[in-house]
Each structure stands twice: as structure tokens, then as C-alpha cells.
Image (cartoon, grey):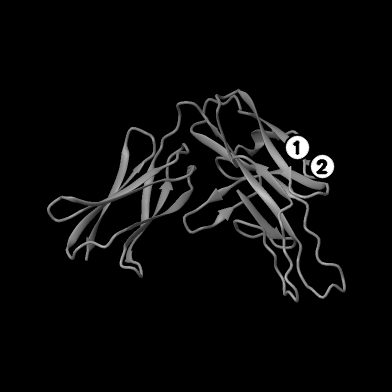
């Protein structure tokens, strides 16, 4: 995950570098560093166990780049918000278990360096399910334009949030809850079904979601399926299914969610064309 913020203001998740300010001439805020590989690291570890991992960071410029490394809690919700709270303050944070190998590094021009980390799971037999947080990898701010350059801008900071998830073996429930269902028709006549999907259990999973639409005689008329990313306990996502318009009539739409556990969760709706 990569996001940015202006130097003076923290803001919610965004996919690329941000530049704020009135511009006389366009000013770009290019990323200066990049995390190479996945930004979601998962491990299964028992209480009392310690494991290690690495994060590879690349300098995208031809000049040395300073990088800061620190911990943060991380939550996200179906309304599109992401929360980066102080490390160790959310109920299932593992931030206090994490020890990064450095709090800052300097990347050589066009070079790469590895940031190591270790995670020590407390020897506590009450731990269940999944615990997680984020290791933040933050590049040095881009410099504002020099005085007299006839352009106004604000420097930007590019940050990567590398999620570090610890799964306790063979513990924790996987549960799914549906809410805020909306049925609509888009501008091309396609039928749209939207809903919030929340993990109400104790263990993270990647939900496999699908919808089946049946006509009044019970014949399957449409099916759509999507695999989603890692959904942590207490977090939620917005799911959207789009399927072709059907002949006029009444239909039953059934939405399924497979969390990888034995049970498959489902909810159904009535569709009228």
C-alpha cells in the first residue's frame, strides 16, 4: 500500500503522490522511493515464538534518499476510510511485538536496501486469531519550489504501509456479516447489487464472494464471483456486483461469502425488473 500526505496535514488513503497548492506552472510530486514486492506480510506463529522478515526498499532517483521507518496501527472500512492510529492502541494490534532493524536508512542513488524486522509473539495462551499492524516506510519530503520560481506548491511525503499480520495457529473464528444493501440500475441498464461485508470474527481471511440470480421458476440466470483481499477482524469492505439486464419479472438474488471456514455465509434479496 502506498499513500502520501502534504507536509502539514495527514489525510486518508490515496493511491499516489499528492501535490497541494495553487500552481502558476505545473509542479510534479514524484515518488522517490518504492517498496519492492508485497505490502502484506503474513505469518503463522504460536505464543512465545519469534519470527523474522524483510522489506526491500528501492531508490527511484539518482541522488541519495533518506527513509524513516516506524510502526502504526491500521484499520479500514467499507465507507472508504483508512485509520492509522498510534501503534499499539487498537484491540488486535501486534505493533508492540514488532522490532524493526532500523528507524532510518539512507538509500544510495538508484540502489536498494533491506529493512529487517522481528516479531515476538507473547507467551500468552489467551491469544486467538489474527493480530496485525503496519510498518511505515516514509521517504524524505519533496522540496517546495525555490523562492522566485513563479510557482507555488507544497512538498509531498510518500509513505508505504506494509501490513504485518500474525495468525495464531488453529485459533479464532471466521465470521461474515452483510449490511447496507443497495440495489440499483446503472446508466447502461445493468443491475447493480452493493453491500458492506464485515469480518465479525477473530481471524483474518480473504473472502470469496459470489452472487447467484434465479428466476421465478428457480432457474439460475446469472452468476458473478470475486476474490477479495485480506479482511481483518472488525474491518469491512464494499462489495459491488454488476450483471446484465434480465427480462421483466421477479428474481431472487443470493449473495454468498466463503471465509475459508467450514460454513459459507449467505443473504438473499428480491429483484424486480
Question: How many other residues sit within 10 Å of disc 2, few (<14), some (14-19) or many (≥20)?
Answer: some
Secondary structure, mark 2, is loop
**Which numbered tag is attached to residue 236?**
none
The x and y percentages for residue 204 are 47, 38
The x and y percentages for residue 6 are 71, 62
Residue at 55% over, 37% down: 131
Which one is in front, 259 or 150? 150
Please tell me which of labels 1 and 2 falls first in the chain.
2
Q: Quadrant of residue 238?
A: bottom left
Residue at 80% over, 41% down: 105
State the residue position of label 2: 108
Q: State the residue lying farthest toward the left.
A: 217
State the residue position of label 1: 113
Looking at the rendering, in which quadrant would you find the C terminus?
bottom left
The x and y percentages for residue 134 are 63, 43
Q: Is residue 164 above or below residue 85?
A: above
Question: How many other residues sit within 10 Å of disc 1, few (<14), some (14-19) or many (≥20)?
Answer: some
Label 1 to label 2, Cα distance in Å? 8 Å
The x and y percentages for residue 173 are 41, 35
Residue at 36% over, 46% down: 209
Q: Quadrant of residue 27?
A: bottom right
Q: Quadrant of residue 35?
A: top right
- Determine whether label 1 and label 2 are within 8 Å by CB: yes
Secondary structure, mark 1, is strand
Amino acid at each position: 500500500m502506498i499513500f502520501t500526505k502534504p507536509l502539514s496535514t495527514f489525510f486518508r488513503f490515496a493511491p499516489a503522490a499528492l501535490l497541494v497548492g495553487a500552481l502558476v506552472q505545473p509542479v510534479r510530486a514524484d515518488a522517490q522511493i518504492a517498496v519492492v514486492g508485497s505490502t502484506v506480510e503474513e505469518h503463522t506463529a504460536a505464543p512465545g515464538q519469534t519470527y523474522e522478515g524483510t522489506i526491500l526498499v528501492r531508490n527511484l532517483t539518482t541522488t541519495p534518499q533518506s527513509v524513516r521507518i516506524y510502526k502504526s496501527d491500521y484499520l479500514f472500512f467499507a465507507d472508504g476510510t483508512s485509520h492509522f492510529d498510534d501503534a499499539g492502541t487498537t484491540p488486535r494490534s501486534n505493533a508492540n511485538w514488532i522490532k524493526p532493524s532500523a528507524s532510518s536508512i539512507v538509500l544510495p542513488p538508484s540502489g536498494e536496501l533491506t529493512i529487517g524486522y522481528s516479531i515476538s509473539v507473547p507467551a500468552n495462551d489467551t491469544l486467538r486469531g489474527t493480530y496485525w499492524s503496519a510498518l511505515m516506510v516514509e521517504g524524505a519530503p519533496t522540496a517546495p519550489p525555490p523562492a522566485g520560481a513563479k510557482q507555488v506548491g507544497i512538498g509531498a511525503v510518500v509513505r508505504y504501509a506494509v501490513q504485518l499480520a500474525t495468525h495464531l495457529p488453529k485459533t479464532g473464528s471466521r465470521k461474515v456479516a452483510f449490511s447496507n444493501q443497495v440495489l440499483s440500475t446503472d446508466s447502461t441498464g445493468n443491475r447493480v447489487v452493493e453491500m458492506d461485508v464485515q469480518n465479525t470474527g477473530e481471524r483474518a481471511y480473504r473472502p470469496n464472494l459470489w452472487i447467484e440470480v434465479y428466476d421465478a421458476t428457480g432457474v439460475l440466470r446469472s452468476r458473478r464471483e470475486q476474490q477479495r483481499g485480506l479482511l481483518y477482524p472488525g474491518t469491512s469492505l464494499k462489495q459491488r456486483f454488476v450483471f446484465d439486464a434480465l427480462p421483466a419479472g421477479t428474481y431472487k438474488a443470493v449473495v454468498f461469502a466463503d471465509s475459508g471456514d467450514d460454513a459459507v455465509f449467505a443473504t438473499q434479496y428480491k429483484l424486480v425488473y
